[in-house]
Image (tube, coloured by chain):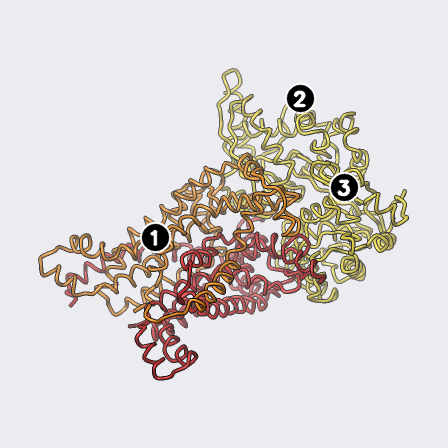
Chain colours: A yellow, B orange, C red
Amino acid sequence: MRLGKSLIAGTAIALVTGGTAVAEELTIATVNNSDMIIMQKLSPQWEEATGHKLNWVVLEENVLRQRVTTDIATKGGSFDIVTIGAYEAPIWGKQGWLNGLEDLGDAYDYADIFEPVRNGLSADGTLYAVPFYAESSFTFYRTDLFEKAGLEKPTEQITYDQFADMVAKLHDPDNGVYGTCQRGKAGWGENMAFVGPMVNAFGGRWFDMEWNPTIDSPEWKAAITYYVDLMNNYGPPGASSNGHNENRALFADGKCATWVDATSAAGYIFNPNESSVADKTDFFQAPKQVTDKGTGWFWAWALAVPSSSTKVDAAKEFLAWATSKEYVTLVGETEGWVAAPPGTRKSTYENTAYIEAAPFAKTVETSILAANPADPTKDPVPYTGIQFVAIPEFQGIGNYVGQQIAAALAGQQTVDQALANSQNFAVREMTKAGYIK
Amino acid sequence: MARAVTASRKALTTAIAGALAFLMFFPILWIVVLSLKTEVDAIRAPWQVLTSGWTFESYGAVQERSDYFKHFWNSVIIAFGSTLLGLVIAVPAAWAMAFVPGKRTKDVLMWMLSTKMLPPVGVLVPIYLLFINIGLLDTRFGLVIVLMLINLPIIIWMLYTYFREIPGEILEAARMDGASLREEVLYVLTPMAIPGMASTVLLNVILAWNEAFWTLNLTASKAAPLTAFIASYSSPEGLFYAKLSAASVMAIAPILIMGWFSQKQLVRGLTFGAVK
Amino acid sequence: MATKASRAAARLMISPAVLLLLGWMIVPLSMTVYFSFLRYNLLMPGDNPFVGWENYKWFVTDPSFSAAMVNTLLLVGGVLLITVIGGILFALLLDQPMWGQGVIRIMVIAPFFVMPTVSGLVWKNMFMNPVNGIFGHLAQAIGMQPIDFFSQIPLLSIIGIVSWQWLPFATLILLTALQSLDQEQLEAAEMDGAGWLSRFWFIMLPHLARAITVVILIQTIFLLSIFAEILVTTNGGPGTATTNLTYLIYVSSLLQYDVGMGSAGGVIAIILANIVAIFLMRMIGKNLDA
């Protein structure tokens, strides 16, 4: 069926070339992240240049994911361009729900895209989504507070135990500074994005080689106990409802001394217009514990064209524009280089203007290149993905486990209960899906 | 009022009622205040918020990002369209139930109400598939139909209770005078039922305006109403209180203003037959 | 009074409404029932084999199922309790003579006009957020540890938010009913030396019985499917503390995309809703029939 589609698409291109391009009206669904809002703001330039028109559907992440998944899985055809993550791209590509994107033209320079990013968005060797921005995770910290507490920036990857000692010295709630802010809001893309790599660091994994869940293992228990203690002792109040955005606002407002989160947040934290701590923030690697494998996550937001779209060519034209080198330059020149979409292209990191404006550039590049979703854990696993497991069932399991851990964090149950419930649920789901016979 | 009330007692009641009313209203008042602040000021303590400067910049930022008026018009069309269509279908049904009650009328009425208990999340996929096949996805017409069906039981019930309060003798008299059924409905019944119909319309416009599940899930861009507009501000990055407040004010203001202007009507009519 | 002809006419007039609602009910319902017997996950295309009662078994044995049932009852019951009692008190108060009655009434009914999503967001961020919310600021100002609403008292917080939205509705209906009360009857009772409490208990409350029934009926219908407020504030958590039946169905059918299991949940919810409907019908039948 995909072959049929591409044949039709090919014919369409053949018909169009030579004549004038047809002006199309495209519906694009995207997430309300600041980078996407910049894209929306700049897109009239593309509309003018090509004559196509864009209808924007900007939604909050959870709503977007639900809305887009429903539409694509039922072949609703509401959207011509969708914003999806590194989790969806390979799964959906394999299902035949997305158009392959190998034909965006020579000028697009595929070789310029970071290898791990390209791999993360491909299935069976075909690229199904093009990266808009990509991220790993690292530790943000406040230089002024470190100085005050007599701490030095670590030169090597520290352990979570060392991290806890550090945080204890920094915690000063009377002056409105909490030792650490970490994600607590339940969701596979929220608290589990932080917890997942941490569990990896403690030597844990989601499944063994036979797809049996291992959430009740001692490694998980050690990791989650550490997490709950750390947050209860040194975290802000209400930690179990703080996600990425809430923590980012807290950190930017000067309320957190440390924060392990997405490298892509650096552009915001180092932007003096948005953040009150732009000149006193630095960063180091996310901590390790018994292993340094899978301790920094890998994520990308990418654009894709559903196979249910009827305007594939125009949609691809937009993709080629919005994820191009030229677009990165455009953002750099109009919005300031610090706001340029990070993590996707080598050329961005060879650009002196960007490196100058973004002191974090080198570290981000290293973290992303180091992230290896294909080998994320100490013990071997049958899956790929660092902070997620690239199977359709993971979304449900990850959300449930996230809820259980959030409840443990909120003090509504013990860590043991949370992990026992999680293990039961995971076994149930994997049995239902036929992984466990 | 027949009872004499001392001024001091009246002052006391006014003070208590005023204070409670202020508390009820405060959240709405507060988002109006926050919407007129900068993002940095909006997260400060309340007393600091009040003493900081005022600005319209959040409204500007919201309008720049989303086309408010497109969503506004979609909301207006969907809310009023579904209500009016519902009225057209409900008036005859309610009339018949009220004036020619059968043995099963009560049961039919209760059954109608029970269709409202269908959990929308459970039937989204079937409806979505249907909408794709009929081509109603992301159309205002599709939403008008769905919201009409959702609110139809309420409309019928409200109208039924109003109609029942109209004394049957008047209709008898009209019939004696040779009025046809059509004339009876048009010239006798309708004028008497106007207040009831008005409050039915009001209540259903409010319910349709605020419906956030179907309107969000069955639209993409063309038919998206204000509920979708709000969904793009619900958890943005960084500081967002002022922009969220501005978007919220923009989304609820039209219905709030309409409600205020017609509150007398609403207070008088919203009885669901609770008053004999 | 009703002739055969008018009966036929009446049937004709009811039929469009009945047919539409029947269609609205039967088409999705039969699809839901059909799906509920299939293994049908949107994320795993392919054939959808018939699996019998398996989906029902999975849904009922879902560890969150019993919690969801309890939460649904607590949520509906809690909100009803607050709004009915609060509504009676508000109605009694607003029925008193006072200055600026119109303005006061407007302020009291205003929350009813607010979209559920907006009210969830506003309460969550501007009020209940322990760091930046008003309650947090106030607690800090008087030197107290701010309450972390959505992790310490999640269900109660949701009940509070929903009650804020529905209290005006209850007040409106009860106030209308109270205003229709015969003043002379009250005065006569007062003459006979009946105190305020006994006047309230023996005259006002019986008069309000019908209105209270209506409030309970309408609100139950809406409260059983509370969803938006939970989605934007707690996502059903922490754990399953705020997961109600509607939210649980949402989790299976739109987060896990297990349409089969979600449909089974939908069927169960419809059956439960109809049990509630029958129960309410009994109550109404007694109380609402003139």
Q: Secondary structure at mark 3?
A: loop
Which amino acid type is shown beneath numbered disc 1?
Val
Instruction: Name the side, left or right, on which C73 lies relative to A400.
Output: left
Which amino acid type is shown beneath numbered disc 2?
Ala
At horizontal 88% and vertical 43% (from top left) the residue drawn is A153
Label 1 chain ID = B
The residue that mark 2 highlights is A107
Whether pointer 3 and pointer 1 mark residues with C-beta atoms closer than 8 Å, the reply is no
Instruction: Point out the frontmost of discs 3 and 2.
Output: 3
Q: Position of residue B19 (x, y in %)?
A: 51, 61
Whether pointer 3 and pointer 2 mark residues with C-beta atoms closer than 8 Å, the reply is no
Instruction: Point out the frontmost of discs 3 and 1.
Output: 3
- Cα separation, mark 1 vs mark 2, equals 58 Å
Instruction: Name the side, left or right, on which B164 lies relative to B44.
Output: left
Which amino acid type is shown beneath numbered disc 3?
Val
Q: State which tag comes first along the sequence, 3 or 2.
A: 2
Q: Position of residue B92 (x, y in %)?
A: 25, 56
The residue that mark 3 highlights is A277
* Tags 3 and 1 both on a single chain: no
- As drawn, the residue found furthest toward the left would be B177
- Observer-nearest of C214 and A396: C214
Label 2 chain ID = A
Label 3 chain ID = A
Q: Is residue B57 above or below residue B262?
A: above
The residue that mark 1 highlights is B201
